[in-house]
Image (spheres, rainbow, N blue to C red):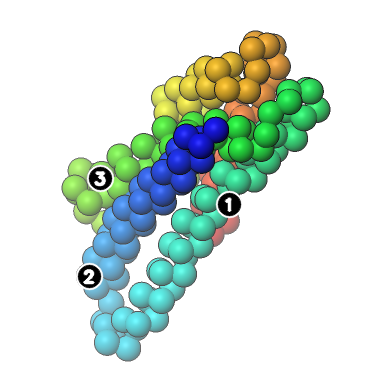
Amino acid sequence: MKYKSRWIILSLAVITLFNLFFQYSVYQKTLNLFWSTSDDKEYLHSTINSMIFVFQGFSIFASLIAILIGSLVISFIGFLLDIKKTRKDYLFVYTLTSLFVSFKVVLTGAINLSGLTTDTNDIVILGNQSVLSQVLDPFLWLGVVLFFLLGIKTLSSSKNKVFILTLVYLSLKSINILSSYFLHYIV
């Protein structure tokens, strides 16, 4: 039981580091774009930095809250399915799966910092892709398989119940994809 707590804390810490790396890459690209187009650099410097830090801090905080909410939803559905496990078990499965899926964030941050995009002013953001490319994302589908396998090992030996939980997990990820896609066009 103790190892699960360690894995949860370690996974959340690594996810936070991955998000910090990605936000740093966005910060660098944003500042480069700002400095190349701005005339009044001294006056706006602190304002731009403050705005960027607020948005990035909210993004990192929101990703951690999304993991907690997702695991609570999964645990509620597990309760309805009469799976007698603690919320820590659900958090363990959801956090490890989210850790695997968050490797995409590291790759995106590396692309931003390396300048592999066709335009050096392009900032690669996860919600900036088409819905189809996000739905066909291999990290998403490997995460779904991982959730199913961890669910069978940790939550229940009933494949039908774990399959339902996996569908709920996929639904939560789909809601996340659609909300990030639509927020990209609203903001």
Marks 3 and 2, how far apart at CA: 22 Å
- Residue pointed to by mark 1: 65
First-in-chain label (3 vs 1): 1
Q: Residue at x 20, y 43 (%)?
A: 116
Question: In the image, what residue type sits under mark 3?
Answer: Ala
Disc 2 element: helix
Q: Residue 58 vs residue 13: left or right?
A: right
Q: Classify 3 as above or below 40.
A: above
**Residue 43: numbered disc:** none
Q: Quadrant of residue 94?
A: top right
Name the spot of residue 87 as percent of width and height, x first: 66, 37
Tell me if 124 is positioned left or right of 148 in this view.
left
The quarter of the rendered structure image containing the N terminus is top right
Residue 182 located left or right of residue 114 = right
Amino acid at circle 1 = Ile
Compared to residue 121, the image places residue 103 above or below, namely above
- For marks 3 and 2 on the same chain, the one whose residue lies earlier in the sequence: 2
Q: Give residue 96's position: percent from left, percent from top.
A: 47, 33
User: How many neighbours does mark 2 have within 10 angstroms: few (below 14), some (14-19), or many (20 or more)?
Assistant: few
Q: Tell me if residue 187 comes above or below residue 105 in the rendering.
A: below
Could you say which disc has been placed on residue 36 in the image?
2
* Camera-nearest label, 3 or 2: 3
Q: Residue at the location (60% across, 32% down)?
A: 89
Q: CA distance from mark 1 to mark 2?
A: 35 Å
Is there any visible trace of residue 6 in the rendered image? yes
Q: Tell me the SS state at disc 3.
A: helix
Q: Nearer the viewer, residue 136 or 171?
A: 171
CB under 8 Å between discs 3 and 2: no
For the residues labelled 3 and 1, the Cα–Cα distance comes to: 24 Å
Look at label 2 and name its amino acid.
Ser
* Foreground of the two, 84 or 165: 84
The answer to whether residue 94 is visible is no
